[in-house]
Image (cartoon, rainbow, N blue to C red):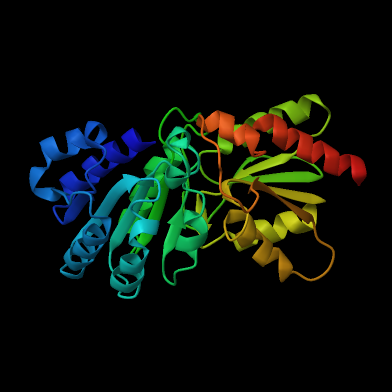
Amino acid sequence: MRDTFVKTLIDIAKEDKNVHLITGDLGFGVLKPFWEQLPDQFTNAGIAEQNMTSFAAGLALEGKTVFTYSIGNFPTLRAIEQIRNDCAYHNANVKIVCVGGGFVYGSLGMSHHATEDLSIMRALPDVTVLAPGDLVEAEYATRAIYEHEGTCYLRLGRGGEKRIHDKIDDFQIGKAIKIKDGARVAIFSTGAIFDEAMEAKEILSKDGVNPALYTFPTVKPIDRKTIEECAKKFEFIVTVEEHNVIGGFGSAVSEVMAELAGTKARIIKVGLNDMYSSIVGSQNYLRDVYGMSSSKIVNRIEEIIAKS
């Protein structure tokens, strides 16, 4: 995803000299093509994410479209006051990019596990939050936030994500994408953990369960229409996110469903169960430990169906 983001941003920045990219002293192997081709539109702010964010806000208020870039929690949680006061409050055209959402940097421990970022960023007024599920969504999401006025957050995986789409005909901020139709169960996924959701659907289909599958590249604004339609059509909605179940994607879906009248689906949230990971390991290992691997998703859904 990060390579796709950089390639897309280079194309955008070549056409718009007001686009500026700032890194917090990270990502040089990936960002090198950008600064080599567009040195006057690139700044390394150093390991000073708060300053990076305020600097970005200043540039944005002078007419620039500014992308900040770093890994995990560094461009978000470390600089949350600057995002709130300097960017969001002024509706500044700053696009905050995190590479390594969830357990991408799992072996580096809790400080590098980005598992609260979606909830915190979506709580800020006027901040748009996107978490693409594959390379194609990442490209469209990058272009969408560039065109969108105001402060945005783009949460990326790292690399190696499975491709979902060949193309997307009508990508829109705030619109979910139906991948497969199904019966009884609808699986909603956001971000790079989509590959686990897709594999879970394939396993369930072989077991005689045929869940529908949706990807939500946008967490805020959430696609209320799709949620409302699925809540009436299916018995169960299962949300999948590589994130704390409190305040994140599942909570955003729950907030919509809580306001619906009449008979509606039951919601089940798959994610980190309101805790920090006290262990380290690869992304796939931690997903499995904390119930987010495809096999664990399958077990959860089959148990729910068996009890219904």
Q: Residue at x 49, y 67 (%)?
A: 123
Which residue occupies the extreme left position in the image?
A: 40
Residue 104 visible here: no
- At 41% from the left edge and 31% from the top edge, which residue is drawn? 159
Q: In which quarter of the image is the N terminus?
A: top left
Q: Can residue 137 be seen in this snapshot?
A: yes
186 or 125: which is nearer to us?
Answer: 125
In screen coordinates, is 231 left or right of 290?
right
Residue 29: give x, y in percent of width and height: 23, 31
* Image side of residue 291 versus residue 222, left or right: right
Vertical position of residue 160 compared to residue 11: above or below: above
Q: Is residue 147 left or right of residue 128?
A: left
Residue situated in front as seen by the camera: 299 or 184: 299
Residue 151 location (% of width, % of height): 34, 64
Give above or below for 78 relative to 139: below
Relative to 8, 261 lies left or right: right
Quadrant position of residue 78: bottom left
